[in-house]
Image (tube, rainbow, N blue to C red):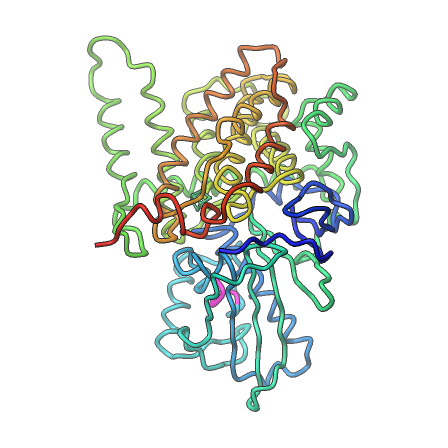
């Protein structure tokens, strides 16, 4: 696998921003940001599994392509489609459902609104008929084996997750062609003519500066000290630059609802996960065992870590749903979607969460979002860019910060909790077996959920002062990711992915 970093002056992409590179492999300097701030609702999105970068992002790109084709004025003349999947999308796109996500997007379906039964029905219909209804209004022949071209060894310098969709007329002339980068967490950038990069869709953030801007942990703590606000209050005030306060609260409550639905559906669904590894779904069986255990009369010493098994269960339930392609909350990615819901369910069941005028759930998500903004602004949440430390590590840090907040932590303690959460995931590689978001991903979410709870508790024991700052840990994560071989960045070419031998 070749390196994707060059020094030829073309734009690179980091953190959801178009930037000019300053050195080989450097993501340090953002000189031409496309947008200045991120919203908590950029970090938490309702979508479908199994991957935000390989499923949700490409689906959004395909949906956007319909508009591009429409703009050509020759939409009705389209008779053939071609989709090139490059780099990591070419290497693990099949296992991650990139191809099927694009089929759904081309059919006019959006990741945040499509219902799980609609997914199956649409794919079955395309395969049975050998035709796809482009944008739901133009029938075109569709043979997956011919439409999708997997090019894992072509790694674009701008980002390892690249794709191009092209539509042709009956003379095989191009009607429309658009390139995209799926940069993690469901974020997509369009690669237009002349290397102009634009987010899809253009975020409203460009238009409204926030009241208390921050991109670093030390800035966040300083803003809280200056204003006397909690991290959650400050975040909520920033969010009002984009939408009314009550709307943000309602949307975060909806996010929590979907997380609960996801856990509930996960723990009642048995079976085997798709993809060929025959991984058994375990959460239904584990749930029954935990209920029996908790109902049984207690003997001997109390097991103080029994609650940890509930944390494991919640994470497994979400990640099994994700691996099955069902509805989840991207938090901040799909591969790491189980951690924040698992810690929130633990908080709901076992912790004494401190309430104020905001529900603890809304405060948890606002604070987790603040930590996610810092990580995404300075490093990455994409496994294809920096390995699993960017996905599971980021989610662990976000959950640690959120949990610390609802336990009553100060901004300094929250920053400390998030730092512990990321520090002890540094160097974590992405090496999913068969390119499926199953092994090690599902159990890894459970491990990181427990780690997040511990991080919050450790931070709460202190006064917020600590040796390594969150900003240093995030910068270390970025540098470690830049040093990491591409074999460990969602390509399934190293680690467990090759240690496992198929019979
Ligand atoms: S190993 Fe980590 S980064 Fe890679 S697919 Fe699994 S959860 Fe995502």
Residue 302 pos. (x, y %): 28, 11
Measured as percent of width and height from the top left, residue 10 is found at 71, 58
Residue 386 shown in magenta? no
Measured as percent of width and height from the top left, residue 161 is found at: 54, 56
Dominant SS of magenta comes to: helix
Relative to 165, is 30 above or below?
Answer: above
Quadrant of the rendered structure where residue 209 is?
Answer: top right
Does 164 sit left or right of 128 as displayed?
right
Instruction: From this view, report whether residue 135 is shown above or below residue 33.
Output: below
Quick check: is 104 in the magenta stretch?
yes
Q: Nearer the viewer, residue 190 or 367?
A: 190
Residue farthest to the top, as pictured: 301
Part of the protein shown in magenta? 101-105
Residue 180, image quadrant = bottom right
Residue sitting nearer the eye, 371 or 209: 371
Residue at 59 percent across and 59 percent down: it is 156
Residue extending farthest to the bottom is: 171
Residue drawn at x 78%, y 49% is: 32
Q: Nearer the viewer, residue 354 or 201?
A: 201
């Amino acid at each position: 696998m070749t390196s994707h970093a060059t020094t030829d002056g073309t734009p690179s992409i980091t953190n959801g921003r178009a930037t000019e590179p300053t050195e080989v492999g450097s993501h340090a300097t953002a000189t031409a940001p496309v947008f200045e701030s991120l919203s908590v609702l950029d970090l938490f999105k309702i979508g479908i599994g199994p991957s935000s970068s390989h499923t949700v992002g490409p689906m959004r790109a395909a949906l956007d392509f319909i508009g591009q084709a429409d703009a050509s004025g020759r939409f009705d003349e389209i008779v053939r489609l071609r989709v090139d999947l490059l780099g990591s999308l070419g290497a693990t796109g099949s296992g991650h459902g990139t191809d099927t996500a694009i089929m759904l997007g081309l059919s006019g379906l959006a990741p945040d609104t499509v219902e799980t039964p609609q997914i199956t029905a649409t794919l079955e219909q395309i395969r049975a008929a050998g035709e796809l209804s482009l944008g739901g209004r133009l029938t075109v022949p569709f043979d997956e084996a011919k439409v999708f071209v997997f090019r894992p060894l072509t790694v674009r310098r701008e980002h390892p997750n690249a794709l191009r969709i092209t539509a042709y007329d009956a003379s095989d002339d191009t009607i429309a062609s658009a390139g995209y980068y799926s940069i993690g967490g469901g974020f997509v950038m369009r690669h237009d003519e002349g290397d102009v990069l634009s987010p899809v869709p253009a975020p409203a953030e460009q238009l409204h500066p926030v009241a208390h801007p921050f991109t670093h942990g030390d800035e966040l703590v300083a803003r809280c000290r200056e204003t006397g606000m909690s991290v959650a209050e400050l975040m909520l005030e920033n969010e009002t630059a984009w939408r009314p306060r009550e709307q943000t609260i309602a949307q975060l409550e909806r996010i929590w609802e979907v997380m609960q639905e996801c856990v509930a559906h996960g723990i009642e669904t048995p079976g085997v996960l798709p993809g060929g590894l025959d991984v058994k779904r375990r959460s239904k069986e584990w749930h029954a065992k935990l209920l029996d255990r908790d109902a049984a009369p207690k003997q001997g010493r109390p097991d103080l870590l029994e609650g940890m098994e509930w944390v494991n269960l919640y994470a497994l339930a979400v990640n099994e749903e994700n691996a099955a392609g069902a509805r989840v909350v991207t938090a901040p990615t799909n591969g790491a979607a189980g951690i924040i819901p698992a810690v929130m369910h633990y908080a709901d069941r076992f912790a004494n969460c401190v309430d104020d005028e905001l529900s603890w759930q809304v405060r948890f998500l606002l604070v987790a979002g603040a930590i996610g903004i810092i990580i995404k602004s300075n490093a990455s949440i994409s496994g294809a860019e920096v390995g699993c430390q960017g996905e599971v590590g980021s989610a662990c840090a976000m959950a640690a910060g959120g949990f610390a907040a609802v336990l009553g932590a100060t901004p300094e303690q929250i920053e400390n909790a998030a730092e512990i959460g990321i520090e002890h995931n540094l160097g974590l590689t992405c090496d999913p077996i068969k390119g499926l978001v199953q092994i090690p991903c599902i159990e890894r979410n459970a491990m990181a959920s427990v780690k997040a709870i511990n991080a919050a508790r450790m931070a709460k024991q202190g006064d917020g002062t600590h040796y390594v700052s969150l900003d240093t840990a995030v910068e270390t994560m970025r540098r470690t990711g830049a040093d990491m071989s591409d074999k460990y960045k969602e390509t399934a070419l190293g680690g467990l992915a090759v240690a496992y031998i198929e019979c």
